[in-house]
Amino acid sequence: MQPSAAPAPKKTLSELHRRRVRVTLWIGSALLIVMGLGWGLFFFTKQAWAIVAADVAMLVLGITIAILTHRRRTRIAFFLLAGCMLVIICGISLMLDIPDAQAPRSTHHFLLVLALSALLFLRDDRAVLRWGVTGACLLAFVVLASSNFGFPHNYVLPDGMRIWGTWVNNSFSAIGIYLLIHVMVSDFAEHSAMEVDMRRGLLRGEFFLVYQPQVTSHGTVTGAEALLRWRHPALGLIPPDDFIPLAEQSGLILPLGAWVLGSACTQLVAWSVHPDLSHLTLSVNVSVHQFRQEDFVQQVKSAMERTGAQAHQLKLELTESALVHDVADIILKMEQLKKLGVQLSLDDFGTGYSSLTYLKRLPLDQLKIDQSFVRDVLTDPNDAAIARMVIGLGDSLGFAVIAEGVETAGQREFLMQNGCYLFQGDLFSKPVLADALAQLVRASVPPPA
Ligand code: C2E
Ligand code: MG
Ligand code: MG
């Protein structure tokens, strides 16, 4: 069997981004550890036990974030860091760093660093989250910068120390802001360059499809999922997770998705002339942006008419996020597609927010159990329960159920024992080129006549 994978890319955009995020987290955790230790010792000498306890908490937090970053749990590490930094900076500004005529407040300048890092970290997140965190930091900054408000008590830092601290705080926050702006500009430039590369790649035919077989419990290959790959001239083979989000942000997903649809239909026609391949169905991933286009149904119809592909062999994979807005319009489009004869599958099922009442209104043919549940189905009772629930749900609503990401015979056994008889995953084959898929189909158990 010929695997589709070529040499791994040198350094993709997402890897660069992830590395920057990790470096920033390391710096953040180091800062917390140093601050916790330094302030802790200082207030220890003053016997200010309440503040020493807060400093110990800061130290523990720094160590926790370092451990999470080491384990690559960067998202939770970021939220922990951002939340705690916000509290710490506001706490210090209001309780220890109260401005007077001799020494201005300076601790709050770190809120600007925090606001910028939120923009960087949450770059690919929902706008409401990104701007929510950034806005909270900026609001706190403006309030602290524009007022002398504070809670004076015995431990307020002496002016001599605060004047010295002003220089330190202002220098470090200025360096932090400069570094983050530099990183963001590089990020932006790389994004733009990648977008230009993608447009060029589409024109130059650098994109291609690989196919991952879908197999029954008897070993018969009934179809495949078409998965997009990009052979970048400099970076090598880039997996879709590294360019589809950018294509979605830039709108390039529309021509790219249209190309995928056309190529998938062409492949179906190529298979149709071989008796041993003509039964295959082909699943095509449809992005939410594609599906929301007014003329999406017409585009599917035109692709089939142009190529001569049979509608019943085309299966469109939608994700739950494509189905959350304007339910009436979505159902109308899905019904129009069904009238054409196209099949509809709900991909990554269980990871979104579909309500059950909503689900039963959708004219679906198939539910796809997400691979995140299949992965630990044998070891995690929650995942096992979710997998069972999806299979039961599919049964009662009259949808076929397929499990993706099946890697071991044990997982397949579990799924079969619970009533799922259609699989996709590395256990059967990684995604391969069309020729290799044809060999796989010929080597597999033929479908019943
Ligand atoms: P998806 O549609 O859920 O596709 C399944 C992904 O799981 C594929 O990753 C496949 O290679 C991977 N996979 C399948 N079996 C296994 C397994 O046993 N173990 C492991 N570790 N992985 C397995 P891939 O090809 O990297 O695609 C990732 C995602 O990119 C897809 O997830 C889909 O959401 C998106 N994508 C791929 N092609 C297209 C496309 O043409 N259009 C759109 N809009 N999205 C696409
Ligand atoms: Mg899919
Ligand atoms: Mg999936």
Image: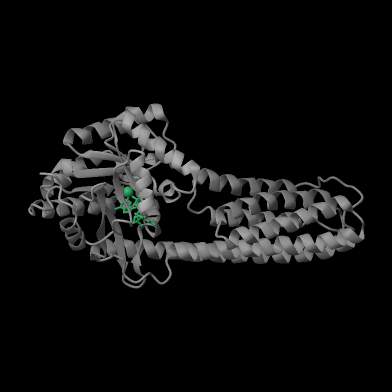
* Res. 369 visible in picture: no
In the picture, measured across the screen, residue 384 lies left or right of residue 292, that is right
Residue 371 x, y percent position in the rendering:
39, 49
Nearer to me, 318 or 277: 277
Nearer to me, 167 or 130: 130
Q: Residue at x 15, y 51 (%)?
A: 446
Q: Residue at x 39, y 46 (%)?
A: 370
Residue 238, quarter of picture:
bottom left
In the picture, measured across the screen, residue 137 lies left or right of residue 322, that is right
Q: Which image quarter holds the C terminus?
A: top left
Residue 425 to residue 164: above or below: above
Q: How is the image coloured?
A: one colour
Residue 339 x, y percent position in the rendering:
18, 32
Task: Please state the total of marks drawn on the protein image.
Answer: 0
In the picture, measured across the screen, residue 64 lies left or right of residue 91, that is left
Residue 336 to residue 111: above or below: above
Q: Which image quarter holds the N terminus?
A: bottom left
Nearer to me, 187 or 274: 274
* Res. 253 visible in picture: yes
Q: Residue at x 84, y 55 (%)?
A: 52
Nearer to me, 50 or 151: 50
Residue 320 to residue 427: above or below: above
Q: Residue at x 26, y 34 (%)?
A: 334
Residue 129 x, y percent position in the rendering:
54, 45
In the picture, measured across the screen, residue 209 lies left or right of residue 46, that is left
Residue 357 x, y percent position in the rendering:
39, 26
